[in-house]
Image (cartoon, rainbow, N blue to C red):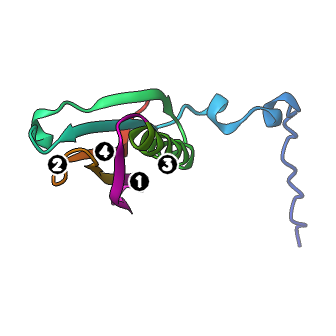
């Protein structure tokens, strides 16, 4: 009766440097995330105002969402202090892709009934 042969796999030397690098340095990020904003009044409908990109692209959705929330808070404070407005309503929700959407409506103290709108959101794109 023949003995089963003992097969051994060749050892593959692994350098420690390979494990010290982050996953992004080995495999480039597939998606990038950017923060967009719009500020408009009732006189100018949202569709007529072009969205502007704010800041750099992110490779992490969580980082982009956190930065979008911080930006929304700053813009909300700026509107209250610089433009003599008060925030009448604010909302937040997430897109199907996981990006945050923040919206605020600001009433003008000098002109009751006139409002301004702020929209900040995270948009997903492909790669960097």
The residue carrying mark 1 is: 100
Nearest to the eye among marks 4 and 3: give it.
4
At label 2, counting other C-alpha atoms closer than 10 Å, the crowd grade (few under 14, some 14-19, many 20 or more) is few
| Residue 16 percent across, percent down from the top left | 88, 32
The residue carrying mark 2 is: 114
Q: Along the line of sight, which residue is nearer the eye, 40 or 12?
A: 40
Q: Earlier in the sequence, mark 3 or mark 2?
A: 3
Q: Is residue 3 above or below residue 72?
A: below
Secondary element type, mark 3: helix
78 sits to left or right of 41: right
Q: Main secondary structure of the magenta part?
A: strand
The residue carrying mark 3 is: 69
Task: Measure the alpha-carbon separation of dots 1 and 4.
Answer: 14 Å
Residue at x 33% of width, y 53% of height: 104
The residue carrying mark 4 is: 118
| Residue 49 percent across, percent down from the top left | 16, 33
């Amino acid at each position: 009766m023949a003995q089963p042969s003992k097969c051994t796999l060749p050892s593959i030397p692994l350098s420690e440097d390979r494990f010290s690098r982050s996953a992004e340095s080995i495999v480039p990020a597939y998606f990038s995330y950017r923060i967009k904003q719009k500020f408009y009044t009732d006189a100018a409908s949202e569709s007529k105002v072009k969205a502007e990109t704010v800041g750099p692209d992110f490779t992490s959705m969580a980082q982009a969402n956190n930065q979008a929330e911080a930006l929304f808070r700053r813009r909300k404070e700026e509107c209250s202090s610089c433009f003599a407005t008060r925030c009448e309503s604010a909302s937040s929700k997430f897109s199907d892709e996981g990006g945050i959407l923040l919206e605020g409506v600001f009433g003008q103290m000098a002109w009751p009934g006139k409002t301004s709108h702020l929209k900040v959101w995270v948009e997903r794109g492909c790669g960097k």
